[in-house]
Image (cartoon, helix red, strand yellow):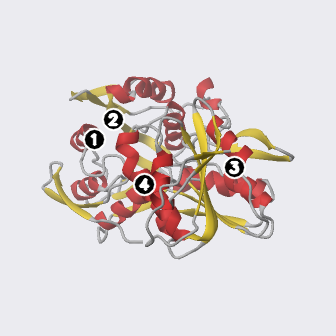
């Protein structure tokens, strides 16, 4: 897959940094104030120190840290596929840095200094802290930065529950950076950290029933709808019909429930589940195993573009771009165009979306027609069939409702 590479230049204090980045992840074309604060205030005086940076993003902060502390071993972590690809290119050839696709945790060994920019979601922040705490060497230090409007005050409070009082190092442009240097690592976890899925060896589990089929789902913070099945996906599952031999693509699979059900409905076919986030892929893989599914597999990649050389009879999705139609219209349109390309002749697209988002119009532009399988005041489930070559004129057929 080819990405539209952008070469950017930043300066975080040690001189110009050459950074490679791609559209498709948060802050892809900038360094944020929390990045600047971490770069400025994090210190490391220990020779050969092990330093972790999360998230890697496009790699600018990890590159700055590797340059500033050349005798240290820097590890950058990220779960988002496009960010990992950008960081890999940015950090290529830097001898004292490595990139890991995933979250920081004890499986990656011990660490002396950690630089964290808080992610979205309080439970995910706690999961991140738990992984770091289980990995922190004696006398280790943790730096945490974030914006007030993104919950840094709450994140600091949650960190203090396991690391003790924070040392506030600086405020800047509605952001702050704090330092923790716990003398004694807590032996007992606060109650909030005992929620299933937060600690590395735990999972949140819940059951889903669709018609005569039942599924046991295992999830963790950071995955969409990780504590219960969301209403949109439930509606899509109720409307999902397949042929027994269909080859099916589940885009933005999350914990995998749509792909699991599709695999059961098409026992002689195959399901490819894909998600841009490694946390979702991890859960989907676990759920394939836990539910005894043998005709499905998971790919960590950027949507339909990761399987452009393959063909499918059905593309199904609860698209992960609901929050802002204006901001995400291009992403939605790209997904619909990509689905058209990878579908076989007479192949079908089925999606669920918030009712106020005009995905029906985008589908008509690409497929020529769309049908509504279900709608209420919040959602609609849409389907379209690829029944002509895209080079033919688009027929403006009416919007059918079944």
At horizontal 29% and vertical 47% (from top left) the residue drawn is 44
| Disc 2 crowd, CA 10 A, few/some/many (<14, 14-19, 20+) | many
Position of residue 356 relative to residue 365, above or below, is above
Tally of numbered discs = 4
Distance, label 4 to label 2, CA atoms, is 35 Å
Sequence order check, earlier mark of 4 and 2: 2
Residue 9 horizontal/vertical position (percent): 17, 57
Say left or right for 55 vs 245. left
Q: Secondary structure at mark 2?
A: strand
Residue 38 shows which numbered tag?
1
Is residue 190 in sight in this rendering? Answer: no
Is residue 69 in sight in this rendering? Answer: yes
At horizontal 50% and vertical 24% (from top left) the residue drawn is 161
| Disc 4 crowd, CA 10 A, few/some/many (<14, 14-19, 20+) | some
Front residue (pair 223, 60): 223
Residue 196 horizontal/vertical position (percent): 67, 35
Observer-side mark, 4 or 1, equals 4
Residue 158 horizontal/vertical position (percent): 48, 26
Distance, label 4 to label 1, CA atoms, is 37 Å
Say left or right for 372 vs 26. right
- Which residue position holds label 4? 333
Q: Secondary structure at mark 1?
A: helix
Q: Quadrant of the C terminus?
A: top right
Mark 2–mark 1 contact, CB under 8 Å?
Answer: yes
- Which residue position holds label 3? 257
- Which residue position holds label 2? 145
């Amino acid at each position: 897959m080819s990405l539209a590479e952008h070469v950017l230049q930043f300066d975080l204090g040690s001189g110009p940094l050459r950074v490679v980045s791609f559209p498709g992840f948060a802050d892809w074309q900038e360094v944020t104030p929390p990045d600047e604060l971490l770069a400025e205030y994090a210190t490391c005086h220990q020779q050969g120190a092990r330093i972790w940076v999360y998230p890697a993003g496009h790699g600018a902060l990890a590159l700055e840290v590797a340059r500033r502390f050349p005798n240290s071993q820097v590890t950058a972590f990220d779960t988002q596929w496009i960010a990992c690809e950008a960081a890999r290119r940015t950090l290529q050839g830097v001898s004292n840095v490595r990139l890991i696709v995933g979250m920081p945790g004890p499986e990656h060994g011990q660490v002396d200094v950690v630089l964290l920019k808080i992610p979205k979601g309080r439970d995910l922040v706690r999961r991140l802290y738990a992984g770091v705490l289980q990995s922190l060497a004696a006398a280790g230090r943790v730096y945490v930065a974030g914006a007030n409007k993104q919950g840094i005050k709450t994140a600091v409070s949650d960190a203090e529950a396991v690391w003790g009082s924070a040392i506030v190092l600086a405020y800047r442009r509605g952001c702050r950076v704090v330092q923790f240097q716990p003398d004694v690592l807590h032996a007992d976890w606060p109650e909030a950290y005992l929620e299933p899925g937060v600690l590395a060896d735990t999972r949140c589990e819940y059951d889903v029933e669709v018609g005569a089929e039942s599924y046991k789902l295992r999830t963790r913070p950071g995955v969409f709808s990780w504590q219960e099945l969301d209403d949109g996906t439930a509606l899509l599952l109720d409307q999902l019909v397949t042929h027994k031999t269909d080859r099916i693509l589940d885009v933005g699979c999350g914990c995998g429930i749509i792909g699991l059900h599709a695999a059961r409905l098409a026992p002689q076919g195959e399901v490819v589940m894909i998600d841009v986030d490694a946390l979702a892929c991890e859960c989907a893989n676990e759920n394939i195993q836990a539910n005894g599914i043998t005709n499905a597999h998971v790919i960590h990649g950027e949507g339909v573009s990761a399987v452009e050389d393959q063909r499918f009879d059905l593309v199904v999705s609860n698209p992960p771009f609901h929050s802002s139609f204006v901001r995400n219209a291009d992403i939605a349109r790209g997904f619909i165009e990509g689905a058209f390309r990878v579908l076989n002749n007479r192949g079908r697209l089925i999606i669920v979306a918030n009712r106020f988002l005009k995905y029906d119009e985008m589908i008509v532009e690409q497929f020529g027609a769309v049908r509504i399988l279900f709608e209420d005041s919040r959602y609609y489930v849409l389907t379209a069939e690829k029944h002509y070559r895209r080079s033919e004129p688009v027929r403006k057929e009416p919007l059918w409702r079944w």
